[in-house]
Amino acid sequence: MDLEFYRPYFTKDFLMGPNSLRVLKELLDQNSKPLDADSLILDLGCGTGLTSFALCKETGAKVFANDLWISGEENAARFAAWGVGDHITPVHENADNLNFEKESFDAIVSIDSYHYFAGTEGYFQKKILPFLKPGGIALFGVPGIKEAYDIQTIELLSPWLEEEAWMFRSVRQWRKILGEYADMASVEVFELGCFEPAWQDWLAIDNQFARSDAACWENIIMPYTCFVGMIVRKN
Ligand SMILES: C[S@@+](CC[C@H](N)C(=O)[O-])C[C@H]1O[C@@H](n2cnc3c(N)ncnc32)[C@H](O)[C@@H]1O
């Protein structure tokens, strides 16, 4: 995936936080069984759909782009403008209650979104895994807290995140939350390497959210947080 191709999209119109395409690229690079034009992918919590666009462009796959805060109509207009309207289907559903056929997807991807709704043990097994085909893969990237600080999350991150600080979990906490079940062939949870460049792309943007994050970068975000990657393969 050539990030330079997507640089025109690294703007306040499409980014909703640290650069989601850097996170997506790192996860796709680590996926040992590449996705292709025969694949069906669910992009869960896709926001403005930039990751759905890249998934479609990079793999040729058909993509379902699901989000809660952004309407299907708004994303449909963007996908049409980007020339991928016939490959990406926008969906407006809560991840807690998805209405797809079971075992539909070769991959379920979720970037900077999964921590909002899936932070309880058993969630993945009950709400997400049933929608993967046998042999399918889940690729998740979320902002988190470094393991060394995960017993002080609220104290360290509240000055920045206020009541959302609890959503930031460490690698070991996410491993426990995902759990181990007979239908999970493999589970990898690790810190992503793209943390700093993904943040720098976001902090360079001129919008009020990026500006308030910039005020916390040196003292909170950089020293205590990270990006956590999760890759789960279904049996
Ligand atoms: C910070 S934005 C990230 C969007 C996009 N993935 C990106 O990286 O630019 C978080 C997204 O999570 C989605 N989200 C939060 N809770 C959700 C839920 N329960 N079901 C589906 N999506 C949810 C929101 O709609 C929002 O677009």
Image (spheres, rainbow, N blue to C red):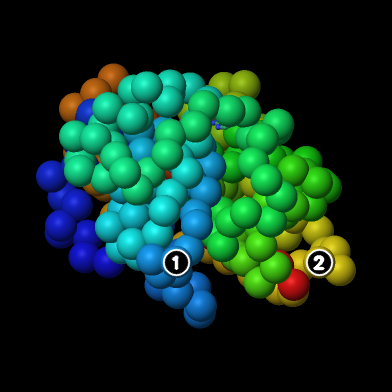
The local secondary structure at tag 1 comes to loop
Res 149 visible:
no
Residue shown at 70%/32% (left/top)?
96
Q: Amino acid at mark 1?
A: Asp
**Residue 105 position in % (x across, y down):** 59, 56
Q: Which residue is at the front of the view, 216 or 67? A: 67
Query: Left or right: where does residue 6 sit relative to residue 229?
Result: left
Residue shown at 49%/32% (left/top)?
91
Q: Which residue is mark 1?
A: 38
Q: Amino acid at mark 2?
A: Asp
Residue shown at 57%/22% (left/top)?
162
51 over 180 or under it: above or below: above
State the quadrant of the N terminus: bottom left
Q: Quadrant of residue 80?
A: top left
Question: Alpha-carbon neighbours of circle 1 within 10 Å: few (<14), some, or many (≥20)?
Answer: few
Query: Left or right: where does residue 233 sit relative to residue 56?
Result: right
The local secondary structure at tag 2 comes to loop
Q: Which residue is at the front of the view, 154 or 41? A: 41
Q: Which residue is at the front of the view, 88 or 190? A: 88
206 over 133 or under it: above or below: above
- Label 2 close to label 1 by CB (< 8 Å): no
Cα–Cα gap, marks 2 and 1: 23 Å
**Residue 21 position in % (x across, y down):** 33, 52
Residue 183 numbered tag: 2
